């Protein structure tokens, strides 16, 4: 079993990997823009994008370093155990103490979150959040995170007590089901942060309904989300499962795109559904949960691992800290590499569905609009794309769409 020095070394190496990605991202801002996306930004907007990209990346490095130093200090100086010593000695209260401290460390990052949202995003015209909205979001996120992490940690403790070495398969299955349940409840969670209203009758609703019905799709509703309360950026997505699916459109998207462009975006999303991409991604999620369960089993096999960190035996809260912040964080780039490769293939295939529906040209203009509204990087480092991108670069997507249109 790994010791304290090994834990700290792995933690440092994981952060250095993240820092390396940020530095590559910073350097790639000077890459030449491909010709087929050269019209996304005009000269002044591109100058503004480069300034935004550089400022965001530098600030990301600074905030990441601050978070890293806080977490490193908590591990190195046995702060978790000292804090847990203030609580009753029951197993649940000891695990809750560690979970609580881990959640409260996010308070250290609040000044960075404030600066990123209320200063940087405001400076470049993206932020629409008021101070009241910002603080309300922080409180809600803290409470939801505390409840969920406490639930997962308690589940780990219960399964370990009940099943011992059978923990691996049982915990992997339970965590996968929990994640599916959270995904199912996402529409309810989202209402904590945003307001939704039905899409009004008209051309857009008629076209979306016709597109979905043509392919045998049923959705519960088509709703508009008040994203403009917080940002000028655009997005759209399906939420829910099966016949409980809901189409959610950012109000910014509705205001920025034509009905045909929005239909193109959802022909793409429908392509994911036709090819069962969500189901396939759940299989990868289960593989990740299985690895997490193996790490949990290895971590909990001996109490000796916890002694150098100030505990007198197993603390399930601290076990989760080690598993998520050190062990899984260290190997997660391998999963990102595989998941990114699979996801990019799925994105190309979903784009092809929009082409088959006759929305190829509209998808190109829609993707350019999304790139412009979201200040996308038009020429990212190919290494970054392979290591962490879930979507292909815009230029590559347009190339594939145009080839599909020419082949029809």
Image (tube, helix red, strand yellow):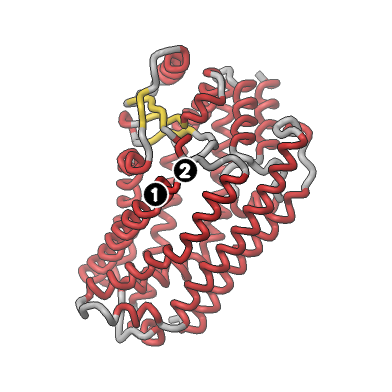
How much space separates mark 2 and mark 1, taking CA atoms? 10 Å
User: What percent of the width, then of the height, locates residue 357?
Assistant: 54, 19
Q: Residue at x 40, y 53 (%)?
A: 138
Left or right side of 73 for 157 = left
Q: Are marks 2 and 1 in contact (CB under 8 Å)?
A: yes
Q: Is residue 302 visible?
A: no
First in sequence: mark 2 vs mark 1: 2
Q: Which residue is mark 1?
A: 137
Left or right side of 174 for 199 = right
Between 395 and 355, which is closer to the camera in this rendering?
395
Q: Quadrant of residue 212?
A: top left
Left or right side of 141 for 24 = right
- SS at mark 1? helix
Q: Which residue is mark 2?
A: 129
User: What percent of the width, then of the height, locates residue 246?
Assistant: 36, 30
Left or right side of 398 for 183 = left
Q: Residue at x 53, y 73 (%)?
A: 69
Q: Residue at x 43, y 40 (%)?
A: 278
């Amino acid at each position: 079993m790994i010791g304290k020095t090994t834990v700290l070394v792995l933690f440092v190496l994981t952060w250095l990997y993240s820092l390396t990605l940020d530095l590559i991202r910073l350097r790639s801002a000077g890459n030449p823009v491909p010709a087929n996306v050269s019209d996304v930004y005009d000269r002044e907007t591109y100058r503004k994008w480069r300034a935004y990209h550089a400022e965001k990346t530098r600030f990301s490095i600074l905030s990441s370093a601050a978070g890293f130093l806080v977490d490193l200090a908590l591990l190195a100086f046995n702060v978790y155990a000292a804090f847990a010593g203030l609580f009753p000695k029951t197993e649940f209260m000891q695990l809750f103490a560690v979970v609580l401290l881990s959640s409260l460390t996010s308070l250290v990052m609040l000044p960075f979150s404030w600066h990123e949202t209320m200063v940087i995003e405001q400076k470049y015209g993206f932020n629409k959040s008021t101070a009241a909205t910002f603080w309300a979001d922080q409180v809600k996120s803290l409470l939801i995170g505390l409840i969920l992490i406490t639930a997962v940690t308690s589940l780990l403790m219960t399964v370990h007590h009940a099943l011992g070495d059978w923990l691996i398969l049982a915990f992997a299955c339970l965590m996968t089901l929990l994640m599916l349940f959270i995904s199912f409840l996402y529409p309810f969670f989202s209402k904590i942060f945003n307001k939704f209203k039905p899409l009004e009758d008209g051309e857009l609703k008629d076209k979306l309904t016709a597109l979905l019905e043509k392919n045998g799709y049923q959705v519960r509703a088509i709703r508009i989300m008040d994203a403009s309360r917080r940002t000028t950026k655009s997005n759209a997505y399906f939420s829910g499962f099966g016949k409980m699916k809901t189409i959610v459109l950012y109000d910014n998207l509705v205001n920025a795109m034509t009905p045909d462009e929005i239909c193109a975006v959802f022909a793409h999303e429908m392509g994911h559904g036709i090819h069962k991409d969500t189901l396939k991604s759940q299989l990868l999620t289960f593989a990740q949960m299985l690895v997490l369960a193996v790490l949990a089993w290895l971590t909990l096999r001996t109490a000796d691992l916890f002694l150098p960190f100030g505990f007198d035996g197993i603390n399930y809260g601290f076990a989760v800290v080690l598993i998520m912040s050190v062990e899984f964080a260290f190997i997660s780039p391998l999963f990102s590499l595989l998941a990114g490769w699979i996801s990019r293939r799925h994105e190309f295939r979903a784009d092809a569905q929009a082409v088959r529906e006759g929305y190829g040209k509209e998808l190109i203009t829609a993707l350019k609009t999304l790139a412009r509204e979201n200040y996308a990087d038009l020429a990212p480092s190919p290494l970054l794309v392979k290591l962490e991108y879930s979507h292909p670069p815009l230029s590559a997507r347009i190339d594939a769409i145009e080839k599909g249109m020419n082949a029809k």
